[in-house]
Amino acid sequence: GHAFADTVYGGKPTEVDHSNVPTAVFSEPELGVIGLTEAQARERLAKVDIYKTSFRPMKATLSGRDTRIFMKLVVDGSTDRVAGCHIIGPDAGELIQLVGVAVKMGATKADFDATMAVHPTAAEELVTMREKAASYSRAGAE
């Protein structure tokens, strides 16, 4: 929107960077994605680390609902840069918008780990995932 208006009406030609655009599907459950999928990362990167979590958010637990959230971080194992994030569950669109800023800026897994978690929130899981669910290299899974 801004790039179009700046280019057409503002006399300031502005290119749009279409890489790493956060995307949400406002379905039930809600979906939020940015960056590479696990499969894409395995095709494109020399080393890939995967972090996953699945949990009942506090607000679901307190209200007695069975709602769950799934989160996955796709990390370039060679650089530690977060190459993708995938969220399924309540508020996934809100969460992925914020992750989008970090991914666009080139945040690393270490940057996520060094961020203080806000408790109790679903988003705190993004900065508290410490165990790799999988690790791949061009030679195969480790």
Image (spheres, rainbow, N blue to C red):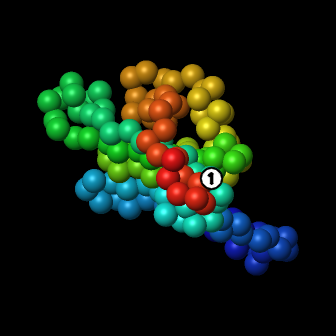
Considering depth in this image, is 53 or 120 the residue closer to the camera? 53
Q: Residue at x 67, y 43 (%)?
A: 80
The residue tagged 1 is 47
Q: Residue at x 50, y 53 (%)?
A: 141
Considering depth in this image, is 18 or 82 the residue closer to the camera? 82
Element type at marker 1? Answer: strand
The reply, left or right, for residue 49 in relation to residue 104 is left
| Amino acid type for the residue under numbered disc 1 | Lys
Q: Is any part of residue 84 visible from this angle?
A: no
Extreme bottom residue here? 8
Percent position of residue 42, x then y: 55, 61
Q: Is any part of residue 137 visible from this angle?
A: yes
Vertical position of residue 130 compared to residue 100: above or below:
above
Q: Residue at x 65, y 68 (%)?
A: 18
Vertical position of residue 57 compared to residue 81: above or below:
above
Considering depth in this image, is 11 or 81 the residue closer to the camera? 81
Dividing the picture into quadrants, the one containing residue 30 is bottom left
Extreme left residue here? 64
Instruction: Classify mark 1: residues with Cα within 10 Å, few (<14), some (14-19) or many (20+).
Output: many
Considering depth in this image, is 29 or 94 the residue closer to the camera? 29
Q: Residue at x 71, y 66 (%)?
A: 17
Percent position of residue 47, x then y: 62, 53
Percent position of residue 103, x then y: 63, 49
